[in-house]
Image: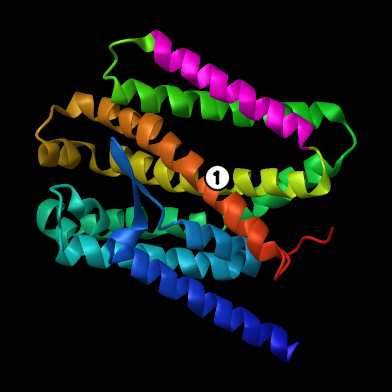
Amino acid sequence: MKNKKTYELVLSALFTAIIVIMAFTPLGYIPLVVINATIIHIPVILGALFLGPKKGAFLGFVFGLTSFINNTFKAATASAFVFSPVLAADIVGISGVFRSMYICFVPRILVGIVPYFVYLLIRNLLKKEQKAWRIGINAAAAVILFFSVRAFISNIIEGENALIATLSGAACALVLFVILTVNTGKKGSTSIALAYAGLAGAFTNTLFVMSGIFILYRDAYANALGIAGDTVIDVIMGVVSFNGIVEAVVAAILVSGIGMALSHVRPIKGMKD
């Protein structure tokens, strides 16, 4: 028991160090031609899976703290105040402290909780004998990849040929569906569940942050970007439908690959195969 606690403490410290390094260096981003995909949430998701939701929530808090520090002292963008209670207080008053505290910390803490339960859910569903569950889960993954590839290619070719983007997305989705359907073994089920945990973690961050901005800061956010208030929803939906999906797919790939490697050293928390 003592060795287990020591191991978990060391692993928590390692994940914490990785989050801090990624947050304050370019290592926290992967350049993908048209965007830099954020991957700072990857160690938070992995921490949730291998250490449990309590320690995952702590790692999420660390993620939020690095965001608070970066946006308060660097303020690289005009909208940095949404993640900084200090800057928000100057712009919208004392209520901004609580609004920005929510946006900065709550979504990131949830990133350390949600993936753990998504993994358990998908893993248990895939262990059932019903083929319908497997087909449904595989189809959902294919649909997500379809929208991701289509959005990515559409941005590269700037909408000149939507058919190319749609066909490319459909082709990638079909290939993924076939691979997932064929790969039905025990290891395959674990890998798929890890991928969904990665998707869930990334989407949790994007959806809660962007919805928080819209609900709590719509007018202030519009002023910061120099746009009309009624167009904020278009900007937010653009971020969710492109950046959010691309980052979620990247998270799925990384969490699945790294998670499978780590599972040979340490089993995923709460799961006995």
Residue 34 shows in the view: yes
On-image quarter of the N terminus = bottom right
Span colored in magenta? 163-183
Colour convention of the picture: rainbow
Q: Quadrant of residue 5?
A: bottom right
31 sits left or right of 150 in the view: left
180 part of magenta stretch:
yes
**Residue 210, image x, y percentages:** 34, 41
> Which amino acid is tagged 1?
Ala
Q: Residue at x 55, y 24 (%)?
A: 172
Q: Residue furthest right?
A: 129
| Residue where numbered disc 1 is placed | 252
Viewer-proximal residue among 113 and 161: 161
Query: 155 above or below 80?
Result: above
Viewer-proximal residue among 55 and 135: 135
**Residue 70, image x, y percentages:** 23, 64
- Report the predominant secondary structure element of the magenta stretch: helix
